[in-house]
Image (cartoon, rainbow, N blue to C red):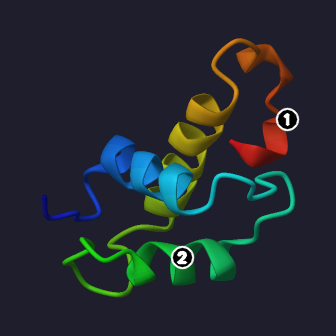
Amino acid sequence: MSLSWEKYWEIAEALNKAHPTQDLIHLNDENLLKMIVALPDFDDEPVPPSPKDLEAVLTCWTELDNPEAPEKIPASAL
């Protein structure tokens, strides 16, 4: 499966599998970007088309990581 920037959920699932213990609250954009482009199936430009793409991936990953408590997701992580 090829991953590209518009596949937020698929990227989040791959990140969750590759980094299951990652602290998402303290993950900055630079490190998130490095993690995304390092995914073996990521096959897109190394820079997202929009800054909102990183935010969307992080939001999806946070929801995957905390499905039972979405109300606990800090606003700063969205």
Count neighbours of disc 1 (C-alpha within 10 A) and say few if under 14, some if 14 to 19, many if 20 or more.
few
- The secondary element bearing badge 1 is classed as loop
Please state the horizontal and vertical placement of residue 70, each as a whole percent of the image. Answer: 71, 18
* Quadrant in the picture for residue 14: bottom left
Horizontal side of residue 5 vs 39, given as left or right: left
- The secondary element bearing badge 2 is classed as helix
At x 74%, y 59%, the residue is 22
At x 52%, y 62%, the residue is 18
Q: Amino acid at mark 1?
A: Pro
Name the residue carrying label 1.
74
In the depicted structure, whether residue 46 falls above or below residue 29: below
Quarter of the picture holding the N terminus? bottom left
Horizontal side of residue 78 vs 10, given as left or right: right
Give the CA distance from mark 1 to mark 2.
Answer: 21 Å
Count neighbours of disc 2 (C-alpha within 10 A) and say few if under 14, some if 14 to 19, many if 20 or more.
few
Please state the horizontal and vertical placement of residue 23, each as a whole percent of the image. Answer: 81, 56
Q: Nearer the viewer, residue 42 or 76?
A: 42
Q: Amino acid at mark 2?
A: Met
Marking on residue 35: 2
